Structure formats: structure tokens, C-alpha cells
Image (spheres, rainbow, N blue to C red):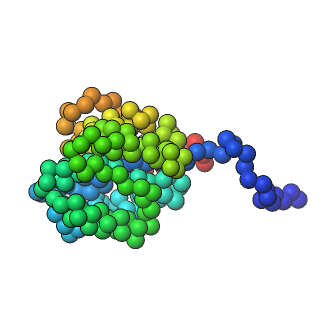
Amino acid sequence: MFESYPSPFAPLEGTTPRPRAIFIDRWGTLLEVPEEGFARSPDDLSFFPNVLETLFRASRAGWLLYLVGNEDAVARGDLSEASWQAIETHLLERLARAGVPVRSSYAGLDQADSVYRLPNTGAFYHAAHSDGIELRESWVIGDSTLELVAGWRAGCRQIGVRTGIGLADGAYEVDPEFVSADLVTAVTDLLHRQHALHP
């Protein structure tokens, strides 16, 4: 009978695959857009159906999860940064309680040309630098052309969703690899593809 034992030696550099990520837009993709157009308090947060369970499965399957997006209500001065921080803290706590770890949360809070303000690529390159993410094997999922073109510029693959504004903003020309009904469908398809490649 053959028995295997864990090696006492660390893997050689370059012999283990780099982690893959899913970069998820907040409003219109992960969360329903409030009637006013933006959240004023944590009570305004509403996840799309079955999102938490699906992201839990993705995390358990080895995907690292990130949030991306611009917070234009803060940039315009309609919402204070302190109020936004309270909303964001509550969002991350809700995800954590559902067993969904968010590796990093990136948000463009002002109108200045910050590297983190989409369609700039700072969020993606920061994740690659900090966590070793393989951007070419990672995906950005969003309901507007803004996050998709930012992901494309960073070398990520893109999935559009028909929730939120459903890519109807027309700000950029994009050609996502897939267009899914919603975030749950998009992530479920990724998990099925992963299982087909690595049963």
C-alpha cells in the first residue's frame, strides 16, 4: 500500500499557482440601488437574492473576493465620508457574518484622478501586488461599462450583469466575455467552469 506524507519543504518558487480573484461592483451588482440613487444609512443596504450564499461558495472554492466602485454621492458632497464609512463597515460586517471574507474593498470617494477611481486600474494592480493575484485569470463583474473597462485595462476578464443599469450607461465600449442575468448566475457559472476544468 502506498501512503503519501506532506513534504517538510516549502514549494519551489513559481511551482504553485497564483490566486485568482473576483472583483465585484457594489451598487447594481452586489446590492440593489436605493430609490434615491445612493444609500444614506446602513438600513438602505439590500443584497440581491441568494448573493451571500453564492459568494460563500466561491470563497470556499478558493476565489479571493474584492469590492470595487466609485462612490459618487461622496464625491458630489451628497453624503459625508463618515456616513459612507458607516455604511461600508456595516456591509463588510454583513458579508463576514455570512462567511464571505472580502480581501480588500476599494472605493473612489472623490472626483480627483485617484488611481483607485474607476476606470483607473489601481484597485486591480494593488491586489496583484499585495496578494499575488493573477489578473489574467481573474474576473471583474459589474452592471456598468465603467468597472468592466477598468478590469479590461488591468488585464482581467469581464462579466456584465443585467441588474442595475445593465450596461446601458454607454460610457465606454466594452465587449465582456459573458453577460449574465445577475451576480449569482455569473459566479455560479464560474464555479461550474472551475469544476469542469478541475473535477
Does 114 sit left or right of 3 as displayed?
A: left
Q: Is residue 121 visible?
A: yes
Camera-side residue of 104 and 197: 104
| Image point (16%, 59%), residue name | 79
Quadrant of the snapshot with the N terminus:
bottom right
Q: Position of residue 5 (x, y in %)?
A: 81, 60
Q: Is residue 51 left or right of residue 22?
A: left
Q: Position of residue 35 (x, y in %)?
A: 12, 57
Determine the image quadrant of residue 41. Answer: bottom left
Vertical placement of residue 136 versus 52, above or below: above
Q: Is residue 49 above or below residue 160?
A: below
Report the residue at 19% width, 37% height from top: 169
Q: Residue at x 38, y 33 (%)?
A: 152
Q: Is residue 58 visible?
A: no
Nearest to the observer: residue 115 or residue 124: 115
**Residue at the limit of the structure toward the right, as seen here:** 1
Q: Residue at 18% of width from left, 60% of height from top?
A: 80
Q: How many marks?
A: 0
Q: Is residue 177 left or right of residue 29?
A: right
Q: Quadrant of residue 160?
A: top left
Residue 127 in picture, x, y percent from top left: 46, 47
Of residues 9 and 138, the one nearer the viewer is 9
